[in-house]
Amino acid sequence: MFDIKKLEWTRTPKECVIEENRIEIVTNPHTDLWQRTYYHFRNDNAPVLQMRTKERFFSFCVRTAFESKHRFDQCGVVMYLNSDNWLKASIEYENNAFQHLGSVVTNHGYSDWATTEIDASVKSMWYRLSRREDDFCLECSKDGVRFSQMRVCHMWEATDEIRFGIYACSPENSSFKAVFTDMEMTECKWLPHDGQQPDEE
């Protein structure tokens, strides 16, 4: 069960509304999460709202709706351990023709970015973050029913308690409203691979 009362901020936005199954975040300009790779800069000031868990096998699902309109505006799911170790999945606005649906995994202070282009008219997306011990799966869905895999990754520092939840930010000089609904924590929907040992809780 996803208990909204257990959510904690790592940096707060300028405006937010938190209700039982609806969270609105208005982003601050010049906020982002990125570490070193390619661009060489380090940005670590995005608002992140998370809960803690020691559950080793689970899935977290959330629906996002957004009014992004400026380059790199983004909102989505996140697992933020500290400045050097985190992952996120989101749609990053690019221009009035296309956006980047993608994910970033940061281990030990270096980020990567895996993306695919989608139409700029898309203004809602579901995400599912699944944990199997220190391995994770990120998925997305247009309808909350059929999910497509975005990536599988290993997080070196996710060995015990982790924090996971939502985030929204505007890396350039802009601001927009992101809405998060249908938040749910369940048993792990990312099933074991054929031949794997059964899950041990």
Image (cartoon, rainbow, N blue to C red):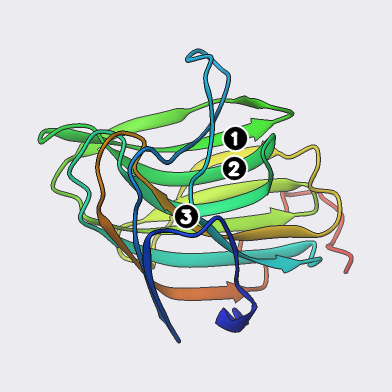
Q: Position of residue 179 (x, y in %)?
A: 32, 67
| Location of mark 1 (residue) | 105
Q: Secondary structure at mark 2?
A: strand
Query: Is residue 144 in view from this perspective?
Result: yes
Question: Are discs 2 and 3 less than 8 Å apart at CB?
Answer: no
Q: Which residue is mark 2?
A: 87
Left or right: 39 in relation to 80: left
Tell me the tag on residue 161.
none
Q: In front here: 115 or 77?
A: 77
> x%, y% of residue 167?
47, 55
Is 149 displayed left or right of 169 in the figure? right
Residue 28: x, y in percent? 35, 49
- Residue 190 visible? The answer is no
Question: Residue 1 vs residue 29: left or right?
Answer: right
- Rendered position, 154 above or below 158: above
Please rate how many residues cluster around mark 1, counting C-alpha atoms within 10 Å: few if below 14, some from 14 to 19, many from 20.
Answer: many
Tell me the distance, in whole angstroms, between the alpha carbons under discs 2 and 3.
Answer: 11 Å
Q: Residue at x 63, y 33 (%)?
A: 106
On the image, the x and y values in percent for residue 96 come to: 10, 36
User: Residue pushed farthest left?
Assistant: 96
- Which residue is the site of mark 3? 167
Q: Amino acid at mark 1?
A: Val
Q: Is residue 88 left or right of residue 68?
A: right
Q: Please say if the residues under marks 1 and 2 sit with CB atoms less than 8 Å apart.
A: yes
Q: Earlier in the sequence, mark 1 or mark 2?
A: 2
Residue, far bottom = 20
Label 3 crowding class (10 Å Cα cut-off): few <14, some 14-19, many 20+? many
Task: Write down the quadrant of residue 21 in the picture.
Answer: bottom left
